[in-house]
Image (spheres, rainbow, N blue to C red):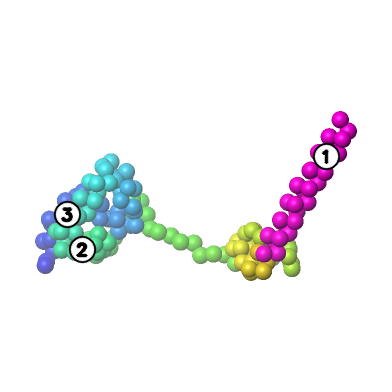
């Protein structure tokens, strides 16, 4: 198949393929072009049929390569993933041997072992029991006063 198969594509189909190649979801493409998601899916299906491929991603890649791989960056923003920055000493968690059971700024992932999680669960259960027992004792003492 030659380049004439790209001439079969409508402007709407090309726009949907460009946005699909930029990793837009179908519902976002539909919102952007002012059409329904069903219309976007129909345009993608017809584009796949014209290009002779089975997947929209493949059709989008073919169009991208056919057009020279250059899109207007103001419309089709590239996907930018920031690399994690190493934590410096000022942001590290100050709990040296006693990590908290939830993520903190210095330790963004809860990496407690099973034993650590069990210890926290037991300590929390004991504190709840103490608070509940103390509340019952205080209410009992108040009821004897009145």
> Residue 53 appears at what percent x and percent y?
19, 64
- Where, by quadrant of the figure, is residue 107 drawn? bottom right
Spatial CA distance of label 2 from label 3 is 11 Å
Earlier-in-chain disc, 1 versus 2: 2
Farthest residue, direction front: 144
Answer above or below: position of 139 versus 90.
Answer: above
Residue appearing at x 38%, y 58% in the figure = 78
Image quarter where the C terminus lies is: top right
> Going by the image, does 136 lie left or right of 30?
right
The residue closer to the viewer here, 123 or 75, is 123
> Residue 10 appears at what percent x and percent y?
16, 51
Farthest residue, direction top: 146
Residue ID for mark 2 = 54
Instruction: Report how many numbered discs are placed on residues in the image.
Output: 3
Can residue 87 be seen? no
> Going by the image, does 104 lie left or right of 135?
left
Tag 2–tag 3 contact (CB < 8 Å):
no
Q: Is residue 135 magenta?
A: yes
| Label ID, residue 46 | 3
> Residue 43 appears at what percent x and percent y?
20, 51
Residue appearing at x 24%, y 46% in the figure = 38
Spatial CA distance of label 1 from label 2 is 74 Å
- Where, by quadrant of the figure, is residue 141 drawn? top right
Q: Which residues are magenta?
A: 118-146
Earlier-in-chain disc, 1 versus 3: 3
Answer above or below: position of 124 versus 38.
Answer: below
Residue appearing at x 33%, y 52% in the figure = 25
- Where, by quadrant of the figure, is residue 98 drawn? bottom right
Q: Residues within 10 Å of mark 3 (few under 14, many from 20)?
A: some
Residue ID for mark 1 = 140
**Element marked by disc 3:** helix
């Amino acid at each position: 198949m030659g380049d004439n198969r790209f001439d079969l594509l409508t402007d709407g189909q090309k726009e949907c393929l460009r946005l699909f190649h930029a990793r837009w979801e179908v519902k976002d493409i539909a919102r952007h072009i002012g059409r329904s998601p069903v219309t976007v899916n129909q345009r993608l299906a017809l584009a796949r049929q014209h290009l002779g491929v089975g997947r929209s991603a493949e059709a989008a890649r073919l169009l991208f390569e056919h057009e020279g791989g250059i899109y207007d960056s103001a419309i089709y923003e590239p996907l930018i993933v920031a690399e994690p920055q190493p934590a410096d000493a000022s942001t590290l968690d100050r709990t040296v041997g006693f990590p908290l059971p939830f993520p903190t700024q210095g330790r963004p992932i809860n990496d407690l072992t099973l034993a650590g999680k069990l210890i926290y669960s037991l300590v929390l259960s004991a504190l709840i029991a103490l608070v509940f027992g103390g509340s019952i004792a205080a209410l009992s003492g108040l009821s004897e006063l009145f």
